Structures are given as C-alpha cells and as structure tokens.
Image (cartoon, helix red, strand yellow):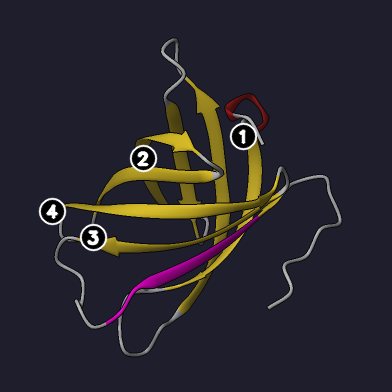
Amino acid sequence: MTINQLPGSYNIIGNNQDIEGASYKGVLDLSLDQNNRVVAKWLINNNQQQFGTGFFKDNILVVNFNYQGEDDSIYKGVAVYKCISKDILDGFWSEKHGNPLFLGQERCFRIGTNNQLVN
C-alpha cells in the first residue's frame, strides 16, 4: 500500500481506553498535506471532533491527535493503525491521561466498500 491510497473517509467502530471499554462509532477523514503528511479528522458519535497529523511507513499509520473535552481541557494522544488493505485499518490508541492499563481500539472501513474486518 502507498500513502496516496490512504486519503478518504472511513466508518469507524471503537472501544475507549478504560475498564468499561465503552464502544463508539464515527467517521475518520484522512487527507495529505503539501508535505505528504497525513491529516486526520474524526467525528465521534456525531458530536466530538478530534484532529491529528501523522506519518505512514510499511503499512503502518501513526497519528498524534488532540481534542477539546467537555471540561474545555485539551486532551492528546497517539493512534497507530495497521493497514490491512487500502480499505481497512485496524488500530489502537492511547491518551496521555488515559488509564495506562488499557488501550483504546479502533477499526476503520473505507466508506463505499463492503469490506469487513474478521478477527
């Protein structure tokens, strides 16, 4: 896979970084900037926007992200995705102040395809 195959919109399903592992859904939009760095924008549960920038090598996408929480604090973290195919990303993430005993998980499916990730 090449970096130029990454841009697009993906439906996401995930679990939070805590003991409950609450699930969520959303959309991840990936694009490239003028320096071929990855620009990411998430919309989680139709109300929380998150933003990030990252890089891609050997079918691994790494994105540093941030968002403003309900308490108006800025939260930061990193997400790492393995590119299963040009249409499926399988990843995990961690926030700086999240529970260090857990990792969040996220699976992304390019919108407009019928792909599914099988465990």
Q: Do the residues labelled 1 and 3 touch (CB within 8 Å)?
A: no
Which contiguous range is marked in magenta?
Answer: 102-108
Q: Quadrant of the N terminus?
A: top right
Which numbered mark, 2 or 4, is in the foreground of this view? 2
In x, y percent, where is residue 77?
Answer: 25, 54
First-in-chain label (1 vs 2): 1
- Relative horizontal placement of residue 31, taking residue 97 as reference (left or right): right
- The number of discs equals 4
User: Considering only order in the chain, which callout, 4 or 2, is on the residue closer to the N terminus?
Assistant: 2
Horizontal side of residue 35 vs 73, given as left or right:
right
The CA span between labels 4 and 1 is 30 Å
Which residue is labeled 1 in the image? 6
As helix, strand or loop, the secondary structure at mark 1 comes to loop
Name the mark on residue 51: 2
Under mark 2, the amino acid is: Phe
Circle 4: residue type: Ser
Q: Which of marks 4 and 1 is nearer the N terminus?
A: 1
| Residue at the image position 46 percent from the left and 70 percent from the top | 105
Q: Tell me what residue is drawn at x 54 percent, y 54 percent.
A: 82
Q: Which mark is residue 73?
A: 4
Q: Classify mark 2: helix, strand or loop.
A: strand
Magenta run includes residue 104: yes
Residue occupying image coordinates x 74% and y 74%: 118
Residue 70 tag number: 3
Question: For the residues carrying marks 4 and 1, which lies nearer the camera in this image?
Answer: 1
Residue density around tag 4, few if under 14, some if 14–19, many if 20 or more, within 10 Å: few
Where residue 2 sits in the image (x, y, percent)? 63, 30
